[in-house]
Amino acid sequence: MRAGDGLCDEAAVGVLVEEGPRYVGELLEWGARFDRDANGQPALGREAAHSVRRVLHAGDATGREIGRVLWERVRALPTVRVVDHALVTELIVTGGRVEGVVFSDREGYLQEARAAATLLATGGAGQVFRETTNPAVATGDGIALAYRAGARVADLEFVQFHPTALNRPGAPRFLISEALRGEGARLVNDRHEAFMARYHPDADLAPRDIVARSIARESDGTRGPVYLTLAHLDEAYVRRRFPTIDEMCRGVGLDLAHDFIPVGPAAHYVMGGVDTDDWSRTSLPGLYAAGEVACTGLHGANRLASNSLLEGLVFGARAAVAMREPPRAAALKADRIVARGSWLTVRDDHHTRGSASQLRGAGLHPSRLTADAVRDLMWRSAGLFRTRDDLQSAVRALDRAQAQAFEPGLEGWRLRNLVTVAGLIARAAVRREESRGGHFRADFPTRADRSWRVHIVDEIGC
Ligand SMILES: Cc1cc2nc3c(=O)[nH]c(=O)nc-3n(C[C@H](O)[C@H](O)[C@H](O)COP(=O)(O)OP(=O)(O)OC[C@H]3O[C@@H](n4cnc5c(N)ncnc54)[C@H](O)[C@@H]3O)c2cc1C
């Protein structure tokens, strides 16, 4: 509740806390292999904003282990038909109800899958930003699909920027997990001084948004890079505990146990998403959402480290229960307000006349709209430090981009999704005139509970 900066949905937190152990137990029964200590007890890790060690882990690839177990279970069920390499391009909506999906199959042919209940589990949207830890598939498709079909989306201004992605020119921005700092790794500036205690009492284990902005400020102040160092820790333990990160570092010529590892912030997790109730129902009957694509409100304005996999486990299981009941729409929760009117979207005459130059000014060239240009714009305008002017010009540019014709085919379709999700994030960020969790407005740097302790929902046509 503290890490979520005053905006965690208490009911959703209650569900996670009450039901989490049951589903973790089920995973263990099904053969999940988490690390154990010398006495055979579960080895628990600690990450930012945790007051105790609480994280089960499988080396440094816990999600992969959970995925392995679940995948084996699904594969063994004769009633499940799996269609590999299918890209969902549209939700089928009839009379306000979702009745399945249109997808492009592995050969590129469009197919339909009709269903009484459809679950979106399409993951996050980190690819909307130039710097991200997310895989290439995290383009926010589920958010765009649901929004275009008329579902409510919520809290999209809240993006978590992970403080420590590898920051080495030419190398991929892979994640240097927070668990390293949980085990004693320290952030240092280019004079090799530890600096986090100057920014927050919890120093290296302060909440993610604070560490991310502190790194950016320290780097600006010293005009040099920021590093993570593990050189004071036991080398054998470092290599045993973090084999994947060790190998990735080696791949770019760095030694995790001895070298100063250059790190910097990158978009990591979207707290917002398709608005769901505590049973993963969306505002459209027949449509459900679970995992990172959903906004249960559980994470508030800033996700507590390690809660995402648990959320997928608990709310995915809850979706399965709800999907067996007759479809019905989720009611709007009491602490949500729906954004109405066009005050966010600047559609005045000046805008229409000046559109081409505004697009260019924002770095989106009208005749050469590319995913990279959108990502770059979002990193500059809706990244770690946001202001009204930057966000408004991004919203204008993205609105104009959205109105353009996209190339036919999957590439154009993905670009359109990216523009839709980027526009929703930028619009939500310009609207919230305060700073909270992952959302930092340099022009409104404090939290303002009286006006803003609410989740804000967008709906098409509002
Ligand atoms: C590097 C990294 C480390 C992390 N570490 C942790 C951690 O230690 N603990 C933790 O709790 N969380 C962690 N997270 C966050 C967590 O991994 C994600 O939030 C979580 O995996 C999301 O799960 P998901 O099932 O919602 O989506 P995903 O696991 O992302 O799966 C989404 C799937 O949907 C598919 N898809 C997307 N669009 C379409 C479409 N249009 N049609 C068909 N399929 C589509 C994708 O290809 C993908 O297979 C980490 C994230 C990253 C990037």
Image: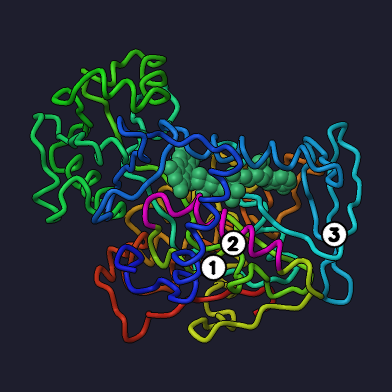
- Is 436 displayed left or right of 201 in the figure? right
Q: Earlier in the sequence, mark 1 or mark 3?
A: 3
Q: Which residue is mark 2?
A: 315
Q: Which mark is residue 407?
A: none
Q: Which residues are magenta?
A: 304-321
Q: CA distance from mark 2 to mark 1?
A: 9 Å
Q: Residue at the spot x=39%, y=65% of the render? A: 301
Contact (Cβ within 8 Å) of mark 2 with mark 1: yes
For label 2, the SS is: helix
**Three-letter amino acid code at disc 1?**
Thr
Tell me if I can see residue 124 in this picture: no
Q: Which residue is mark 3?
A: 100
**Three-letter amino acid code at disc 2?**
Phe
Q: Residue at the spot x=18%, y=32% of the render? A: 224
For label 1, the SS is: loop
Q: CA distance from mark 2 to mark 3?
A: 20 Å
Main SS, magenta region, reads: helix
Q: Residue furthest front?
A: 39
Q: How is the image coloured?
A: rainbow
455 in the magenta segment:
no
- Is 222 displayed left or right of 84 in the figure? left
Q: Which mark is residue 296?
A: 1
Ligand 1 sits in quadrant: top right
Instruction: Give the mark toward the camera: 2 or 3.
Output: 2
In the rendered image, the vertical position of residue 260 relative to residue 77, given as above or below: above
**Three-letter amino acid code at disc 3?**
Gly
